[in-house]
Image (cartoon, helix red, strand yellow):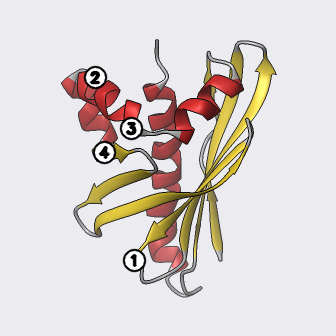
Amino acid sequence: MATYQGKPVVIKHPAEEIYNKLSDLSSFQEKLESLPAEAREKLGDVHFTADSIVISAPAVGEMVFKLVEKVPFTTLRFAAENSPVPFGITISLKTIDENTTEAGSKIEVEIPAMLRPLIGSKMQEAADKFSEMLSTLFVA
């Protein structure tokens, strides 16, 4: 299993608030639609349901990440549905102070070792973009 760690981002909200919002993702769809066009374009084709994140990518098609594990105020884990290979995203939350949280993302995917050099940079980019998306969604 290859692991790609996204760059951590600082979010000016308490970890409990972030965790609660990420536990029910449907509120993000409206927030996403209210973002300026430039910010939406930067995030790509993403939409949310109550318990899933749907990302459309040109080379891959539609990927659905279903919320499969929650550890209160610290961790949320999503697994790809109908993926030909095991694929998951984990969001980690770490309290900095009562109103600030460090959030990070980790992508785990089962890819053959010989393909990692070809795919690795794209997977790292995806992990970084996912962290960036988190910080964008929590901008006041």
Q: Nearer the viewer, mark 3 or mark 2?
A: 3
Which badge, 3 or 1, is on the more N-terminal residue?
3
User: Of the residues under marks 2 and 4, which one precedes in the sequence?
Assistant: 2
Q: Amino acid at mark 3?
A: Ser
**Residue 32 placement, left or right of 104:** left
Question: To which residue does mark 4 refer?
Answer: 47
**In this rendering, would 104 be left or right of 42?**
right
Q: Residues within 10 Å of mark 4 (few under 14, many from 20)?
A: some
Q: Mark 1 is on which residue type? A: Asn
Mark 3 or mark 4, earlier in chain: 3
Q: Are marks 2 and 1 in contact (CB under 8 Å)?
A: no
Q: Residue at x 53, y 71 (%)?
A: 87
Front in this rendered view, residue 92 or 26: 26
**Alpha carbon separation for disc pair 4 and 1:** 17 Å
The label nearer to you, 3 versus 1, is 3
Numbered circle sitting on residue 35: 2
Q: Secondary structure at mark 3?
A: helix
Which sits earlier in the primary sequence, circle 4 or circle 1?
A: 4
Separation of disc 2 and disc 4 at Cα? 13 Å
Tell me whether circle 3 and circle 4 mark residues in contact (CB < 8 Å).
no
Spot occupied by residue 108 in the image (x, y as percentages of width and height): 60, 66
Q: Quadrant of residue 48?
A: top left
Q: Residue 82 bears which disc, if any?
A: 1
Task: Tell me if mark 3 has few (under 14), some (14-19) or many (20+) residues whose alpha carbon lies within 10 angstroms of its own.
Answer: some
Read off the residue under disc 3.
Answer: 26
Three-letter code, disc 4: His
Image point (62%, 15%), residue name? 12
In the rendered structure, which amino acid carries the disc numbered 2? Leu
Residue at x-position 51% and y-position 28%? 135
